[in-house]
Image (spheres, grey):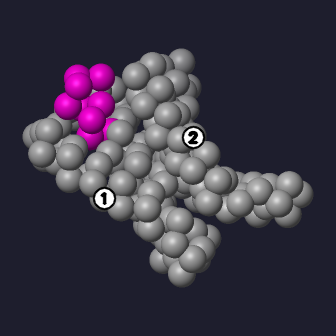
Amino acid sequence: MRKQVKRNLLFAAGIGAVAGLRSMTAPAVVSWAMEQKWLRVPSRRLKFLKSKRTAAIISALAVGELVADKLPNMPNRTEPGSLAARAVSGGLCGAVFCASRRDTILPGAAVGALAAVGSSFAGYALRKRLDEKFAVSDKAIALCEDALASGSGVLLLRAA
């Protein structure tokens, strides 16, 4: 496997992992990265992701998710519906990343989706473990997770 292909798949996995932590943060970061020209627009069909308007709308959805995550009645991220949404988000972002690098999109989509599922379970397990071991407030852990997802997404795509 070419070195560049491996690198692209690694970045696709990274943005997929972000989607596993926060499903709307990953597409928001990808949209802003395209708008800022950190990523090339991979095709005419995806050109809408580059607009400031689209980036703002997706960002508003991401902020809504950050707020909703703190509510007590939110479903668990590992439930089938939530997990599927995270896998789709990770797959889409992984595919867009690989396409922006003129690489094949199917491996990027698969790696992004798998990373999203993996990080969903890992994030859930870590959150529960921290709560049990250190009796840290779930909201405090969630805020740290928000910062981790947002910050790593931006750093990842900026470095790409």
Query: Would residue 52 appear left or right of 72 to someone viewing this image?
Result: left
* Disc 2 residue type (three-letter): Leu
Query: In this rendering, would 126 be left or right of 65?
Result: right
Q: Relative to 103, is 115 on the left or the right?
A: right
**Quarter in which the C terminus is drawn:** top left
**What segment is highlighted magenta in the picture?**
30-38
In the orientation shown, which residue stands out farthest toward the bottom? 73
**Residue 155 inside the magenta-drawn segment:** no
Which amino acid type corresponds to the residue marked 1 in the rendered image? Leu
Residue 52 locus on image (x, y percent) = 14, 39
The residue at 86%/55% (across/down) is 134
- Residue 98's place in the image compared with 24, above or below, is above
Q: Is residue 80 above or below residue 154?
A: below
Q: Which residue is outermost to the right?
A: 133
Task: Report how far apart the C-alphas of labels 1 and 2 lie in the structure.
Answer: 18 Å
Residue drawn at (27%, 35%), measured in percent from left and top?
Answer: 32
Which residue occupies the foreground of this view, 29 or 43?
Answer: 29
User: x and y percent of residue 85 in the render?
Assistant: 43, 66
Which quarter of the picture shows residue 114? bottom right
- Label 1 neighbour load within 10 Å: few <14, some 14-19, many 20+: some
Query: Residue 76: percent from the left, percent from the top?
Result: 60, 74
Residue holding disc 1: 61
Secondary structure under the numbered disc 2 in the rendered image: helix
Asked if residue 13 can be seen in this view, the reply is: no
Instruction: Note whether 142 is above or below 112 in the view shown.
Output: below
Q: Decide: marks 1, 2 in contact (CB < 8 A)?
A: no
Residue 27: percent from left, percent from top: 34, 48
Which residue position is annotated with label 2? 148
Query: Residue at image x 52%, y 34%?
Result: 152
